[in-house]
Image (cartoon, rainbow, N blue to C red):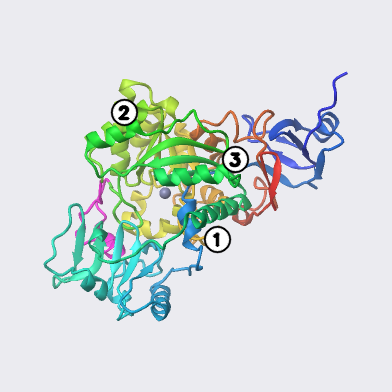
Amino acid sequence: MLLAADADLILHNGRIVTVDSSFSIKQAVASKDGRITAVGDNASVLASERGAKTRVVDLHGQTVLPGLIDSHVHPLGAGLSEFRTPLPTLNSYEAVRSYVLARARVTPKGQWIVVPRTFPTRLSEMRMPTRELLDVAKEHPVMFDASYVVVVNSMGLKVSGITRDTKNPPGGEIVKDSSGEPNGILRNAQDLLKGVDRAERFTEAERLDALEGQLKRYVRAGLTSVIDRALTPEEIELYTKLKAQGRLPIRVVMTWRMPTAGNTEDLVRQIRAAPYRVDAGDDWLRFGIFKVTLDGGMTIGTAYQRAPYGEFGEQLYGITNKDDRGQLFVPPDKLLAILRAARDKGWALTAHSQGGGAVDGLLDAFEALNREKPLAPSRSHLMHASFQTPESIARAKRLGVLADVQPAWLYGDGDALGKVFGDQGMKYFFPLRSYVDAGVIFAGGSDHMIGHDKNRAVNPYNPFAAMWTEVSRKTSAGKVLHPEQRISREDALRSYTIWGAYLQSAEKRKGSIETGKLADLVVIDRDILKCPEDQIREIEPVMTVLDGKISAK
Ligand SMILES: [Zn+2]
């Protein structure tokens, strides 16, 4: 007779949404040594897996999902952003003004005040601020951080020596008002600022604490795997240390983002010399993906589009030329040379490609590489690809290229972007149904970068709110953005489980609840497949199981 298996953990009497190939629902799941050993009905799993030391949890009908995967996070920056001081929600000019005044009271005169990253698409005014708003601080230089675009107040311009006569830096712009004076907006020109100390100083121990803290918050949100999307070599080191100290609370795939400012030959040499290997590492921490930043952002009018930003773009982004299409940071030849070198190292390739022009440019490069050698096995992907067309979707499918998509932007920025691009221009904005129909696999990611709270952060990383957006396409104003692009709850779940696993070439080890896979599960407080649609966003995890261990409640 066979000895009874002695499971570490059995969850039974539940609704186990396995996300296997037939999307089957089971009652019980058992795990041992971090692996799933059985999935099935209550009686058979208990009979075959229960031993003397097994921890048995009666779920009383609760729903269990595979551990969720967020395919786009920036936990270090986010963790540090509120490491010392909590951040306010900055959703209007009034909130920005109060923040600046409050900081002015506690900041020595003459020292820079930096308004934490805020996008004009998320301000109720839907208008890029100019120096006047920040001039509430008279004795401090102030910088409003909208990533590739910043706005500074009059004193900020003055201490940096920026006047009506200052020349634009290469690829950047000092925006002027109708009288020719700088209005405070600097597009891709923040290197001109003098004395601004953007980064608070943190010791390595603090950085490790902040990273660990944020990764733990991810687990509490129901996530068991994430892809970090923009690491420097130093930050890759930081992860290695966190793991060596036994403090890595979640599975992480690392993306190296290489700055592309240097000349092509140097960059190619740097890639060839880089020590990263995709076959090293383990299921907790491994290097997997290479990234460059191809264009700017749609929330600030620098994403490189197929069509100009037009008149509303002038208001929303402070663009001075309504024919402006945004910025492409890497010319085609250089992009191809860089990606080819990375491909030759065996890495999955991606590039921040937000506007349609950037998407097309990245697909051109992918197509050229694919002619040399099939690209599909590398699981290379578009990143964001916010503005698609039927042609670009078909090209992605032909090449076997995937997409890393951000539902939180559809919710947070869809209304403002609708005013810029019009209804037709938004037809293929995060076109998830078109992806499903074409067979382009996509993975959901938050692009979480600032703030600790899963619902209030920039960008929110609550995976249930994200899946709700994929299903409903409701924006923050309650509008349904192109309902024909809504997807089923099952596909929304796939985008945060098995398709996320597929994107990181890990679909044989995670992403569904099947025997032999990693025992990563999340128990939730209502049934995501049956609850009223608007409740999907309210779902809370009640227990996360990671590597077979109950790791958060
Ligand atoms: Zn990102």
**Residue 489: percent from left, percent from top:** 59, 44
**Residue 343: percent from left, percent from top:** 36, 28
Mark 3 or 1 closer to N-term?
1
Give the extent of the magenta segment.
Answer: 306-328
Query: Which label sits in the foreground, 2 or 1?
Result: 1
Residue at 21% from the left image edge and 73% from the top image edge = 158
Query: Which label sits in the foreground, 3 or 2?
Result: 2
Q: CA distance from mark 3 to mark 1?
A: 26 Å
* Number of marks in picture: 3
Q: What secondary structure prevails in the magenta region?
A: loop
Q: Report if residue 110 is visible in the image.
A: yes
Label 2 close to label 1 by CB (< 8 Å): no
Q: Report if residue 543 is visible in the image.
A: no
Q: Residue 46's image quarter?
A: top right
According to the picture, the residue beneath numbered tag 3 turns out to be: 490
Residue 255, above or below 98: above
Q: CA distance from mark 2 to mark 1?
A: 40 Å
- Relative to 222, is 255 on the left or the right? left
Q: Which mark is residue 367?
A: 2
Label 3 close to label 2 by CB (< 8 Å): no
Let me know if residue 321 is in the magenta part. Answer: yes
Q: Which mark is residue 453?
A: 1
Q: CA distance from mark 3 to mark 2?
A: 31 Å
Q: Specify whether tag 1 is near ligand 1 (CB below 8 Å).
A: no
For the N terminus, which image quadrant? top right
Q: Residue 356's image quarter?
A: top left
Let me know if residue 466 is in the magenta part. Answer: no
